[in-house]
């Protein structure tokens, strides 16, 4: 009976004397287990052995294993820091914060159980990508990649792209670290983009595991319409107006050009104006248009003064010639008028008016008669120097004519044969000497139209 009591007492005391006595403090928090990267969750423990020196084995039934897999010796009253690595199962769909037990076993197979919570995630869920707003007038932007979890990535290859840029880099990311990139922008890459939100993509590679994450970039609305103007040419004058939309919204444009009633006749437009408004002697041409981002409206207005310029030159030449003619040294003007003869013959009075504009000498005036007429040899006024009826020629000679002197030579021609129709008289010729030079001047051509007997002269 005493033996039975002793055995029962030993069985009751033995578990107490053999049980391990450990104090375990978890030093880290929010540990992460990355499933598709086969990265373990690393848990840092501080273990104090309150019992005798022993070798301890850490194990769990969660995941595919735990390191270290060998036993760890902890002496009596010793505190040791231990790093445990919990490996995930690749075939598990379990995600998010997960609680499970791990065990610590002594050499006598006595053990204790500890509860732990880990965040089980996929690789792509460890990151966040973002960017500041893009100002159309700025030439740079900051973007970032943020490590949201308590895990150190030793080497990440990242390709970041959007409608505004495309960059690639290799870097490491510590737990909760934000990697910032300052990207220089090329306006030519996005000058035709409208304001709004655009996708920012990141292709990440870590130990042959890939992930794609996205976010949005806001392209801030800006209305920027730049205008330039150029004028060139004199005879063919060209005005070019360019309006460029450097913003990212559709720009409303209105351009007006004024012309007068003369210049408009020689002006062409490209493109044609939208509105033409006439106000008195002014004409207003207006182009109304909508310009998309990155586009340029070019208005070309050409005024060709070549034709009016040539006309003006011709007019000046004519005026100069007329003036030169009008300032000849000697001006001859011939006139003819009908006369009624007593015998019923056809008779005309011929008058030659001489105007000397400058001093001249040895002046010889020669006038020829038309066929079928004779000269009446009685003269009034200046008497001719020579009359040749056969050659039908009459001449006057003057030794000199003073500047401004005026002479009128008059004679009568007649014909016994009636004349009908247009009767032409030859020009009168003046030959004179001025400044030692011989000059010659002709009068105007004179006509007489004889339809009826009393029809007067036409000049």
Image (cartoon, rainbow, N blue to C red):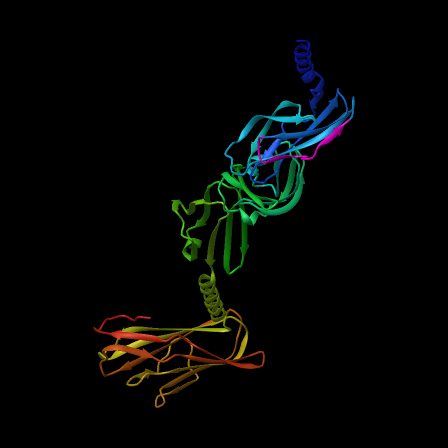
Q: Position of residue 159 (x, y in %)?
A: 59, 46
* Front position in the image: 123 or 255: 123
Q: Is residue 65 magenta?
A: yes
Residue at 39 percent of width and 84 percent of height: 394
Q: Is residue 153 magenta?
A: no
Residue 342 horizontal side relative to residue 78, left or right: left
* Front position in the image: 314 or 294: 294
For the N terminus, give its image quadrant: top right
Residue at 43 percent of width and 46 percent of height: 287
Give the magenta-colored segment's residue range. Answer: 61-74
Q: Quick check: 403 above or below 190?
A: below
Q: Position of residue 70 (x, y in %)?
A: 69, 35
For the C terminus, give its image quadrant: bottom left
Q: Is residue 415 visible?
A: yes
Residue at 48 percent of width and 74 percent of height: 330
Residue 47 horizontal side relative to residue 216, left or right: right
Residue 145 horizontal side relative to residue 198, left or right: right
Residue projecting furthest to the front:
1
Q: Position of residue 432 (x, y in %)?
A: 51, 80
Q: Position of residue 271 (x, y in %)?
A: 42, 53
Q: Quadrant of residue 451?
A: bottom left
Q: How many marks?
A: 0
Q: Is residue 127 visible?
A: no
Residue 143 horizontal side relative to residue 288, left or right: right
Residue projecting furthest to the bottom:
390
Residue at 25 percent of width and 79 percent of height: 346
* Front position in the image: 173 or 165: 173
* Front position in the image: 129 or 224: 129
């Amino acid at each position: 009976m005493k033996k039975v009591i002793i055995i029962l007492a030993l069985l009751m005391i033995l578990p107490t004397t053999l049980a391990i006595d450990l104090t375990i403090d978890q030093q880290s928090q929010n540990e992460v287990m990355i499933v598709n990267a086969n990265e373990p969750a690393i848990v840092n423990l501080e273990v104090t052995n309150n019992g005798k020196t022993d070798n301890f084995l850490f194990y769990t039934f969660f995941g595919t294993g735990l390191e270290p897999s060998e036993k760890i010796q902890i002496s009596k009253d010793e505190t040791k820091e231990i790093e445990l690595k919990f490996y995930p199962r690749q075939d598990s769909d379990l995600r998010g914060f997960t609680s499970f037990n791990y065990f610590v076993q002594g050499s006598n197979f006595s053990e204790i159980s500890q509860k732990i919570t880990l965040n089980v995630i996929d690789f792509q869920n460890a990151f966040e990508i973002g960017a500041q707003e893009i100002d159309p007038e700025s030439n740079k932007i900051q973007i970032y990649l943020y490590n949201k979890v308590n895990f150190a990535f030793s080497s990440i290859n990242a390709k970041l792209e959007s409608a505004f840029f495309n960059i690639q880099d290799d870097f490491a990311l510590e737990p909760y670290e934000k990697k910032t990139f300052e990207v220089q922008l090329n306006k030519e890459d996005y000058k035709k983009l409208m304001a709004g939100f655009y996708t920012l993509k990141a292709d990440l590679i870590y130990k042959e595991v890939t992930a794609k994450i996205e976010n949005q970039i806001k392209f801030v609305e800006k209305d920027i319409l730049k205008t330039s103007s150029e004028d060139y040419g004199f005879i063919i004058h060209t005005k070019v107006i360019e309006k460029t939309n450097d913003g990212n919204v559709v720009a409303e444009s209105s351009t007006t050009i004024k012309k007068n009633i003369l210049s408009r006749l020689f002006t062409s437009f490209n493109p044609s104006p939208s509105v033409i408004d006439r106000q008195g002697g002014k004409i207003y041409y207006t182009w109304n248009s909508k310009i998309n981002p990155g586009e340029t409206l070019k208005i070309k207005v050409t005024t060709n003064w070549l034709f009016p310029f040539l006309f003006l030159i011709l007019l000046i030449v004519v005026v100069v010639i007329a003036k030169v003619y009008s300032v000849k040294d000697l001006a001859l003007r011939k006139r003819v008028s009908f006369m009624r003869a007593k015998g019923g013959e056809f008779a005309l009075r011929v008058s030659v008016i001489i105007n000397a504009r400058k001093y001249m000498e040895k002046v010889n005036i020669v006038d020829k008669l038309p066929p079928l007429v004779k000269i009446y040899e009685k003269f009034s006024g200046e008497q001719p120097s020579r009359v040749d009826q056969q050659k039908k020629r009459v001449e006057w000679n003057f030794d000199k004519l003073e500047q401004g002197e005026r002479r009128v030579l008059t004679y009568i021609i007649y014909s016994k044969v009636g004349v009908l129709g247009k009767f032409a008289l030859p020009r009168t010729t003046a030959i004179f000497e001025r400044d030692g030079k011989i000059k010659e001047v002709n009068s105007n051509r004179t006509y007489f139209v004889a339809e009826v007997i009393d029809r007067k002269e036409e000049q």
